[in-house]
Image: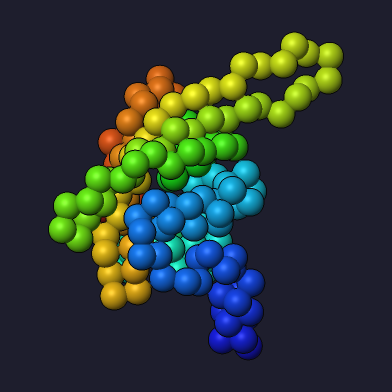
Amino acid sequence: MKAVLFIALVLAAPAAAQAPASDPAAAVEAFYAIYGPLHGQRGGIPDATARVRYAPVLSPRLNKQLVEAAAAQARLTAKVKNAVPPMLEGDIFSSLFEGASAWKVGACQVTANIARCPVALSYTPPPVANRKAEKPANWNDTVLLVATPQGWKVDDVIYDTGFAFGNTGRLSSMLAMVVAALP
């Protein structure tokens, strides 16, 4: 039954995520094609269903880190009797806690089998009744990719902005911290 669900979810992934990306910018666009509909559903470490959707566009290393961080979170939840907040909250794929609602991939720099792609991101808060519309937040992050036999894959995100209440450093470092904190 799980195998059938896995196959169904992979087949349901956008076509752009299925084709090998021969260009780093196309690989980043394929990542955001999946990220867009998923980012607002739940923050923190993606659940198993979301990880299946992301798997085709992420490197084996990043996929493994997400699985390990999810397992560490599950161990913490099982250990603590009362409700425990997740180790990571908010959007983990961008600097801003709320995540991005729009993006524009810049010109990627390629060195051997690694690419760095700057991404201009923005978040427009949803309108709230009887309240003045909030201004959008705009920032830049960098998506790192590696060349694999299956094409370019997202391997990390560098949080370039430094928001007071956002992510800093790298996605991979944040995931490693969760795994190390919950052996």
Write down the quadrant of residue 12 in the picture. Answer: bottom right
Query: Where in the figure is residue 103, as x and y percent of width and height?
Result: 51, 38
Determine whether 159 is above or below 27 in the image. Answer: above
Determine whether 178 is above or below 119 in the image. Answer: below
Q: What residue is drawn where x is 59% and y is 37%?
A: 101
User: Looking at this view, is 85 or 112 the one in front?
Assistant: 112
Q: Name the quarter where the N terminus is drawn.
A: bottom right
Residue 19 is left or right of residue 148, and the answer is right
Q: Name the quarter where the C terminus is drawn.
A: bottom left
Q: What residue is drawn where x is 35% and y is 74%?
A: 150
Q: What residue is drawn where x is 22% and y is 55%?
A: 114
User: Looking at this view, is 130 or 145 the one in front?
Assistant: 145
Query: Where in the figure is residue 117, as x and y percent of width and height?
Result: 33, 44
- Say whether residue 124 is visible: yes
User: Looking at this view, is 79 or 153 the one in front?
Assistant: 153
Query: Where in the figure is residue 2, as x and y percent of width and height?
Result: 58, 83
